[in-house]
Image (tube, grey):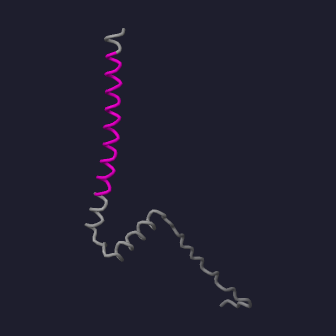
Amino acid sequence: MQIVFFRRPKPKQFEYKPRYYDEEEERLRKRREEMEKSGHGDTSFMQSEIDRRWRRLDKKNRSKSRGLTLLVYLVIAALLVYFIFFA
């Protein structure tokens, strides 16, 4: 049998729960909540919205590339005309 004059308390447990903050996830969560509040919480609506935005960006990028392609063809044609008639 042990005789203890000064009883030591057990050490307190340290419970550290690390927090992880993802700014992109927070932004998407807020956007989703706004959509649900406005009555557009349906995922098909979100999909159609994303699809519409992608189509608009794709159309804009295609029109830019068409102009650049036309410019390249005009420069090549001008160089060919120069070398055929003046060289």
Q: In the figure, 69 relative to 80: above or below? A: below
Q: Is the magenta stretch mostly helix, strand or loop?
A: helix
At x 60%, y 77%, the residue is: 14
Location of the N terminus by quadrant is bottom right
Q: Which residue of the protein is positioned furthest toward the front in this rendering?
A: 85
Q: Is residue 32 left or right of residue 1?
A: left
Q: In the figure, 77 relative to 68: above or below? A: above
Q: In which quarter of the image is residue 5?
A: bottom right
Q: Quadrant of residue 25?
A: bottom left
Location of the C terminus by quadrant is top left
Q: x, y (%) of residue 2?
A: 67, 89
Is residue 58 within the magenta segment? yes
At x 31%, y 53%, the residue is: 54
Q: x, y (%) of residue 12?
A: 63, 81
At x 64%, y 83%, the residue is: 10
Residue range of the region highlighted in magenta in the rendering: 52-81
Q: Nearer the viewer, residue 11 or 40?
A: 40
Q: In the figure, 34 relative to 79: above or below? A: below
Q: x, y (%) of residue 3?
A: 70, 91
At x 54%, y 73%, the residue is: 17
Q: In the figure, 68 relative to 6: above or below? A: above
Q: Which residue of the protein is positioned furthest toward the top in this rendering?
A: 87
Q: Quadrant of residue 35?
A: bottom left
Q: In this view, does 9 lie to the left or right of 51?
A: right
Q: Which of 80 and 1 is in front in this view?
A: 80
Q: Nearer the viewer, residue 14 or 44?
A: 44
Q: x, y (%) of residue 52?
A: 29, 57
